[in-house]
Amino acid sequence: MANYNEADLKMISSIEEKFGKKIDEWFKIVEKSKLEKHKQIVDYLKQDHGFTHGFANYIALKFRSADAGSVENQEDLITDQYSKGKEQLKPIYDKLQNEIQKFGKDVEIAPKKAYVSLRRKKQFAIIQPSTKERVDVGINLKAVEPTDRLEKSGSFNSMVSHRVRVTDAKQVDKELIGWLKSAYNES
């Protein structure tokens, strides 16, 4: 099992307090369910055990060792995301990261198995190579109306309010960076 940082310990304490079992007990319950996919585990914990999404998501990530804290080298998660036919999308990720790093020293980059979470005090965006042709940028801008480009996230990811589909690094422009900066400022 992964080493736990301070944020993990807070989350684990909250789970144990709210849901009455130790984290290892929840892992055993998930293991007995024989569910393997992240969404299946999250839905199971929410529907059968009354978890809220954030807590269920946390347990699913830790159970599947799919978060940054569960691997030795976080860069390996990013390398894996941009492999198997998605290598040509890495310049989009790199350009986004370069621009986002300019927001401030408090930007936290937290790679997961399928995407990278961008956090300040809370998550403000995600970067996910969704297909071999496209990177989806999920952004938390709850008070902003969708546009043709800044669409509602829909079923893409419930942890963000909007999504921008990016197929070329040239699309990482002032407009997209502006939305990301606004989300960062609100987080």
Image: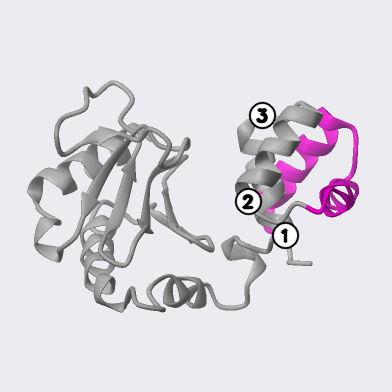
* Residue 4 tag number: 1
Give the class, few, some or many, for how many residues have Cα within 10 Å of label 3's Cα (few <14, many ≥20).
Answer: few
Choose mark 3 or mark 2, whichever is in front. 2
Q: Earlier in the sequence, mark 3 or mark 2?
A: 2
Horizontal side of residue 167 vs 37, given as left or right: left
Which quadrant of the structure image shows residue 147? Answer: top left
Residue sitting nearer the eye, 104 or 141: 141
Cα separation, mark 3 vs mark 2, equals 15 Å
In magenta, the rendered stretch is 5-34
Horizontal side of residue 74 vs 125, given as left or right: right
Cα separation, mark 2 vs mark 1, equals 20 Å
At numbered mark 3, what does the secondary structure look like: helix, strand or loop? loop
- Residue at the disc numbered 3: 52
- Residue at the disc numbered 2: 38
At a point 50% along the width and 78% down the height, the residue shown is: 76
At a point 23% along the width and 43% down the height, the residue shown is: 181
Amino acid at the residue labelled 3: Thr
In the image, residue 71 lies at what x, y percent? 63, 72
> Looking at the rendering, in which quadrant would you find the C terminus?
top left
Q: Earlier in the sequence, mark 1 or mark 3?
A: 1
Horizontal side of residue 66 vs 129, given as left or right: right
Above or below residue 166? Residue 113 is below
Residue sitting nearer the eye, 91 or 15: 91
> Looking at the rendering, in which quadrant would you find the N terminus?
bottom right
Magenta stretch: dominant SS?
A: helix
Q: Earlier in the sequence, mark 2 or mark 1?
A: 1
Amino acid at the residue labelled 1: Tyr
Above or below residue 25? Residue 142 is above
